[in-house]
């Protein structure tokens, strides 16, 4: 039996050591520009989130950067004036945020945990949750939306990115050769859809485990958790054989209902 939280914690710590692009902190020049009001962050792929998706003024805004460690989004939001808490499963990822905070004089709180359990925070603790494309590393997504709703204040904002679940139908080995070969039924899990040893052979020793989630779970789950979706975007996968044919990522902005 594999504990997916423990496995992916160690896996993302390893990704930090190996320099995965989503673990490399922003430089001091990015923080300086953010302090001057010139900033952008990504939610899906390499596409900057439109500024109109954010509150007009981030100063004093209580933000939870959910499963968003790596020293990238959280420090930029803090430099723009927000009160930022970064929550992530990986101590290595959180250390990147702490490093940027120390280097550039930012006040950032870091908390380690499973994105499905935000019990470290009281109800109504935040004005915004920024949740980049990371719930594909979590076995269940609906508890994530319920917890986001709980920790947000009425009228609070949820910005979320997620992988197009249809991408998981394809055979990974064929994708590496540039071929689109349908292999898997959905919903997908690395633990149940691959032969023993195949996951590591394809992705390297101790690679993070991934899961597909249906559009009903991703979008309908937000609605069931009490959110009203106000904006939607898509972006291509930033690399690979699927990029030419279908979107790789989706993003939503949603508002928690009052009351």
Image (cartoon, rainbow, N blue to C red):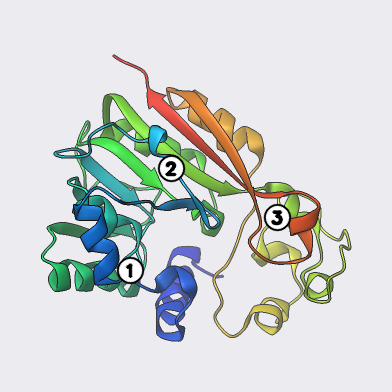
Q: Is residue 182 visible?
A: yes
Judge by depth and name the residue closer to the eye, 108 or 213: 108
Left or right: 185 in relation to 86: right
Q: CA distance from mark 1 to mark 3?
A: 33 Å
2 or 1: tag closer to the N-terminus: 1
Left or right: 225 in relation to 73: right
Residue holding disc 1: 26
- Is the residue under label 3 in contact with that under label 2 (CB below 8 Å)? no
Residue holding disc 3: 188
Residue 185 locus on image (x, y percent) = 81, 52
Residue at the (37%, 51%) spot, across then down: 40
Badge 2 marks a residue whose secondary structure is helix
- Is the residue under label 3 in contact with that under label 1 (CB below 8 Å)? no
Residue 144's disc is 2
The answer to whether 212 is drawn above or below residue 210 in the figure is above
Residue 122 locus on image (x, y percent) = 19, 38
Residue at the (21%, 43%) spot, across then down: 121
Q: Indicate which label's residue lies in the foreground, 2 or 1.
A: 1
Q: Residue furthest top?
A: 259
Residue at the (66%, 57%) spot, across then down: 237
Residue at the (66%, 59%) spot, across then down: 189
Q: CA distance from mark 2 to mark 3?
A: 18 Å
Residue 200's disc is none
The answer to whether 113 is drawn above or below residue 147 in the figure is below
Badge 1 marks a residue whose secondary structure is loop
1 or 3: tag closer to the N-terminus: 1
Query: Which image quadrant: the N terminus?
Result: bottom right
- Is the residue under label 1 in contact with that under label 2 (CB below 8 Å)? no
Left or right: 174 in relation to 251: right
């Amino acid at each position: 039996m594999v504990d997916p939280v423990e496995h992916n914690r160690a896996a993302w710590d390893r990704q930090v050591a190996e320099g995965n692009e989503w673990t490399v902190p922003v430089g001091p020049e990015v923080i300086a520009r953010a302090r001057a009001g010139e900033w952008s962050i990504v939610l899906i792929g390499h596409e900057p989130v439109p500024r109109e998706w954010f509150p007009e003024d981030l100063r004093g805004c209580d933000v939870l950067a959910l499963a968003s460690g790596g020293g990238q989004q959280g420090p930029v939001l803090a430099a723009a004036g927000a009160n930022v808490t970064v929550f992530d499963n990986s101590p290595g990822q959180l250390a990147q945020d702490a490093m940027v905070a120390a280097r550039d004089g930012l006040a950032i709180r870091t908390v380690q945990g499973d994105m499905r359990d935000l019990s470290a925070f009281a109800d109504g603790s935040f004005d915004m949750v920024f949740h980049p494309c990371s719930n594909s590393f979590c076995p269940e997504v609906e508890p994530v939306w319920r917890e986001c709703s709980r920790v947000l204040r009425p009228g609070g904002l949820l910005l979320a990115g997620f992988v197009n679940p249809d991408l998981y139908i394809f055979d990974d080995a064929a994708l590496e050769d540039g071929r689109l070969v349908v292999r898997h039924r959905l919903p997908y899990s690395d633990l149940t859809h691959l032969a023993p040893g195949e996951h590591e052979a394809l992705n390297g020793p101790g690679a993070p485990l991934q899961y597909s989630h249906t559009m009903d779970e991703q979008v309908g789950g937000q609605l069931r958790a009490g959110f009203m979706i106000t904006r939607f975007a898509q972006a291509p996968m930033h690399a690979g054989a699927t990029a030419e044919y279908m979107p790789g990522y989706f993003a939503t902005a949603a508002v928690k209902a009052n009351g």
